[in-house]
Amino acid sequence: MAFDGFDSRAMSRIAMKAELLDADTELALAYAWRDQRDEAALHRLITAYMRLAISMAAKFKRYGAPMNDLIQEAGLGLMKAAEKFDPDRGVRFSTYAVWWIKASVQDYVMRNWSMVRTGSTSSQKSLFFNMRRVQARLEREAAAVGEKLEGHTLREMIAVEVGVPLHDVEMMEGRLSGSDFSLNATQSTEDEGREWIDALEDDSEQAAEQVERDHDLAQLRQWLLEAMAALNEREQFIVRERKLIDQPRTLESLGQEMGLSKERVRQLEAAAFTKMRKTLESDASEVKAFFA
């Protein structure tokens, strides 16, 4: 579903007009996309559940991100869900998609909260989206009995409530309360004071590291070519189409092209990998020395 050129209100109106899928139709579309890569089925599935994506995106408006961007991220999460959904598991697509939509929007919010990455672990995510709410509740409950929570005691209670280590709470508190500063700001009030950017370590790849990396890549490429040379033409074709191109092909599409069943292509692929493994194992001492 393309939303280019639409604002968030227009997107919402379009999504609300989309069809509502019953369980059987949803399942049929999911099978058509998974097994036949039917793009029309994918488009219909995504369009029908875009209203769900928009609804979830709206819950994150308070973090200051543009609504259009939140909807786009929610749409990406929806498409990831469609790509990974397994209709054989017996759950509704909407139930499965909720997790992917939420994860996609949360990642976007955290990436754009600050120029400094706020965190990506499960505990850091939980803190980022729940810390202020939990803190406010704990403070209200303490005030109701005439107490006042602050400092270390409050952070300890938040850590227990959210189920994360205390040092994660302390780190997140500092990041949420801080703000970004320009690296071009001077370190002192003097006119010719050194800028903060001058104090950063140069972490770009050095010449020696680049030469070593290029050498290693060349060696790995040579081993791959030798392993591929041990295969017949048909096996080389399968390995190349399955593993060595930007968009690997499915077993079914290869089977259709080669006039073979999907299972037969899988067997040929497995046999090819076995041959390649034996070729690499014949040079085992050299490979082990390389990775030592």
Image: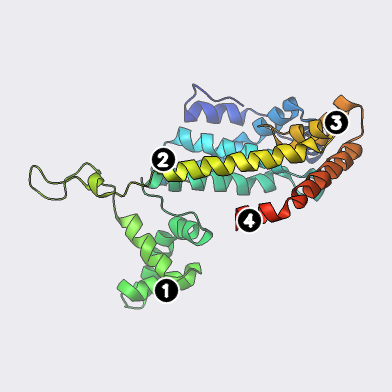
Q: Give the CA distance from mark 4 to mark 3.
A: 32 Å
Q: Give the CA distance from mark 3 to mark 2.
A: 51 Å
In the visual, does 55 lie left or right of 242?
left
Residue sitting nearer the eye, 188 or 107: 188
Residue 65: assigned label: 2
Residue 20, percent from left and from top:
70, 34
Q: Tell me which label, 4 or 3, sits earlier in the chain.
A: 3
Residue 21, percent from left and from top:
74, 35
* Amino acid beneath label 1: Met
Q: Give the CA distance from mark 2 to mark 4.
A: 51 Å
* Amino acid beneath label 4: Ala
Q: Is residue 59 visible?
A: no
Q: Give the CA distance from mark 1 to mark 3.
A: 63 Å
User: Mark 3 sits on what residue?
Assistant: 234
Q: Quadrant of the N terminus?
A: top right
Q: Are marks 4 and 3 in contact (CB under 8 Å)?
A: no
* Amino acid beneath label 2: Ala
Secondary structure under tag 4 reads helix
Mark closer to the observer (1, 3): 3
